[in-house]
Image (cartoon, helix red, strand yellow):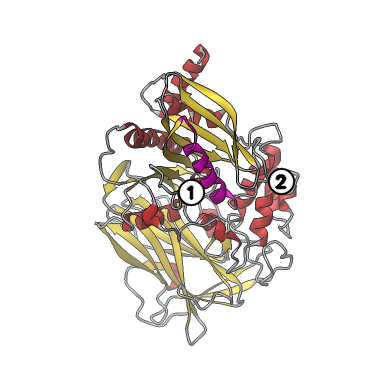
């Protein structure tokens, strides 16, 4: 290691909040790993310079390259602490053979890589995996199936059911999917790295989001077809089995090794990842999770990932101390503190119903009389916009919603001024009674925090796509009057509504461009060109008590 490399390592450690370490290591680049079909995947091996014996391996599998920021953030910090690290480019990326078709080959390729590592003389047979986002997915594709099991995994900011980020309860996540397609489609073309803002690409993205049909929108932003985008638009129909190879929530979780996870309240994977945590604990797997106030891959989130990974790997591979404290750490937003819990959701949370009322009220008391429904029309030619929320990249998080709430296609229900702070910690749900004019429609519900100045900021939201092929179902029931009772799963949160603020609920027929507009015609996502407005009735009477259920921390 050169003097400059050591200095860079010390700077990186300081940025991640790690104790300064400078254990010498060497890097062997472009190590070829053969796959069963004859393709070779390339990896870089980081090994302590003074190691004479076989060591355990920390495996990182990712499609974003192995140099630069990737090396400094996800390999070198571990190598400086005496870990042997193997960073591998997934199929079809940065020198690895084959074609990059995201999420479809990581199971076979990952298991083959683990078997190859265990056969190397410099590996003692023990393999752990780590990483976030896509390289968190590569861990889910391997960990429940490896035999013998892995030593530990750290699948951060990801989910076992990865497609939850593509299709949120049936609604395609348009902005996130096209944004990511633009990034991976141009990441090896030179110029600015994909995560760096590029005004020209951003402008192309905005235009492409509004284009119809959507199937070729990838060529508008990436200047070439992108395999993921074509799969995303071609396999969005209910019951499509194409993505079954990518989702692992049905795997035998009892085979999972100990798990450490980090996510953020504004991370697009947070809801599913918290479900993963609860399922892992139910299966008896030692697991920990920390949820902070972060958007996907924000610096604070990455800092927490690296910091917890170092401690986790030291415990499992170097006989370091076990983590202390409760297994669930949650940042209580707008309270400036973290809370700990033995479970998710916290046992101290109790559900409180807030009912939608006529004339835009919101009340803990259920309606007892008849009332006229509220009405609005959703027009996909002028789709209801969304601001803020859990996006793949900024801007996201909280935003001023007042302009959106002034639109005629958004219903607003506002509660009384809070006399004391209200801490909402856990999953949030809504049951909305609606009668849409069309069979194909979306129901979007958002919970907001209205401050003393009247500024309304989003806290959590959720969407459900209505489709005659999936209605009725467990989460959508049909009454004798044709009114649908729609169960909408909003994002989970840990959030303090301060005294003097008010709760507000929005109900609308979409949230564009975060979610693809529903054309109302039933045409497939990629091919739809025609659009039809849809009139909605939203009921809030004694027979149809529409409500939002929030978990209040006692």
Q: Which of marks 1 and 2 is in front?
A: 1
User: Which comes sooner in the sequence, label 1 or label 2?
Assistant: 1
Which stretch is magenta?
105-122
Q: Where is residue 207 in the image (x, y as percent from the top left)?
A: 71, 50
- Classify 122 as above or below 471: above
Task: Identify the residue at image location x=70%, y=43%.
Answer: 203
Q: Is residue 410 visible?
A: yes
Other-residue count near label 1 (Cα within 10 Å), few / some / many at <14 / 14–19 / ≥20:
many
Q: Where is residue 553 in the image (x, y as percent from the top left)?
A: 27, 56
Q: Position of residue 149 (x, y in %)?
A: 40, 47
Q: Is residue 152 left or right of residue 470?
A: left
Residue carrying label 2: 221
Q: Is the magenta stretch mostly helix, strand or loop?
A: helix
Q: Nearer the viewer, residue 178 or 410?
A: 178
Cβ–Cβ below 8 Å for labels 1 and 2?
Answer: no
Find residue 460 and name its label. Answer: none
Q: Is residue 531 left or right of residue 164?
A: right
Q: Does the magenta stretch include residue 278?
A: no
Q: Quadrant of the C terminus?
A: bottom left
Find residue 142 and name its label. Answer: 1
Other-residue count near label 2 (Cα within 10 Å), few / some / many at <14 / 14–19 / ≥20:
many
Q: Is residue 134 visible?
A: no
Q: Which of 325 and 461 is in front in this view?
A: 325
Q: Nearer the viewer, residue 206 or 174?
A: 174
């Amino acid at each position: 290691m050169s003097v400059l490399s050591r200095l860079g390592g010390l700077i990186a450690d300081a940025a991640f909040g790690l104790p300064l370490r400078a254990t010498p290591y060497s890097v062997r680049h472009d190590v070829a790993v053969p796959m069963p079909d004859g393709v070779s995947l390339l990896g870089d091996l980081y090994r302590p310079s003074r190691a004479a014996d076989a060591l355990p391996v920390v495996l990182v599998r990712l499609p974003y390259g192995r140099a630069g920021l990737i090396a400094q953030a996800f390999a070198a910090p571990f190598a400086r602490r005496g870990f042997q690290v193997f960073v591998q480019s997934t199929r079809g990326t940065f020198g690895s053979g084959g074609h990059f078709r995201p999420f479809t080959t990581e199971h076979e390729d990952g298991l083959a890589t683990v078997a190859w590592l265990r056969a190397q003389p410099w590996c003692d047979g023990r393999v752990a995996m780590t990483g976030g986002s896509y390289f968190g997915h590569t861990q889910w594709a391997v960990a429940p199936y490896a035999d013998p099991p892995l030593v530990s995994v750290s699948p951060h900011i990801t989910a076992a059911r990865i497609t939850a980020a593509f299709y949120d309860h049936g609604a395609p996540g348009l902005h996130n999917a096209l944004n990511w397609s633009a990034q991976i489609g141009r990441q090896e073309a030179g110029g600015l790295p994909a995560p760096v803002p590029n005004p020209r690409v951003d402008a192309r993205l905005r235009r492409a989001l509004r284009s119809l049909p959507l199937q070729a929108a990838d060529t508008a932003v990436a200047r070439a077809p992108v395999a993921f985008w074509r799969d995303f638009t071609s396999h969005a129909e209910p019951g499509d089995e194409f993505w079954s190879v990518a989702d692992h929530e049905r795997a035998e979780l009892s085979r999972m090794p100990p798990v450490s996870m980090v996510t953020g309240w504004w991370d697009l994977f947070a809801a599913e990842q918290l479900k993963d945590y609860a399922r892992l604990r139910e299966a008896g797997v030692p697991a920990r999770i920390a949820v902070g106030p972060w958007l996907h891959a924000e610096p604070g989130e990455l800092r927490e990932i690296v910091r917890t990974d170092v401690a986790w790997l030291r415990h499992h591979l170097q006989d370091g101390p076990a983590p202390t404290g409760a297994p669930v750490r949650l940042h209580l937003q707008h309270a400036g503190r973290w809370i700990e819990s033995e479970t998710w959701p916290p046992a101290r949370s109790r559900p409180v119903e807030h009912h939608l009322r006529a004339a835009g009220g919101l009340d803990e008391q259920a309606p007892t009389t008849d009332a006229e429904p509220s009405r609005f029309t959703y027009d996909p030619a002028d789709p209801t916009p969304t601001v803020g929320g859990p996006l793949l990249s900024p801007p996201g998080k909280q935003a001023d919603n007042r302009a959106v709430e002034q639109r005629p296609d958004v219903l607003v229900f506002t509660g009384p001024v809070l006399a004391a702070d209200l801490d909402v910690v856990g999953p949030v749900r809504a049951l909305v009674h609606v009668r849409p004019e069309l069979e194909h429609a979306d129901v979007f519900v958002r919970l907001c925090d209205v401050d003393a100045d009247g500024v309304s900021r989003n806290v959590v939201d959720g969407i459900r796509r209505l489709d005659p092929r999936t209605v009725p179902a467990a989460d959508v029931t049909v009454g004798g009057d044709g009114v649908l009772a729609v169960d909408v799963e909003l994002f989970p949160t840990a959030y303090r509504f301060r005294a003097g603020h008010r709760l507000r609920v929005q109900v609308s027929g979409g949230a564009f461009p975060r979610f693809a507009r529903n054309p109302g015609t039933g045409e497939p996502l990629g091919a739809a060109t025609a659009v039809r407005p849809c009139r909605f009735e939203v009921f809030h009477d004694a027979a149809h008590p529409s409500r939002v259920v929030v978990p209040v921390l006692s």
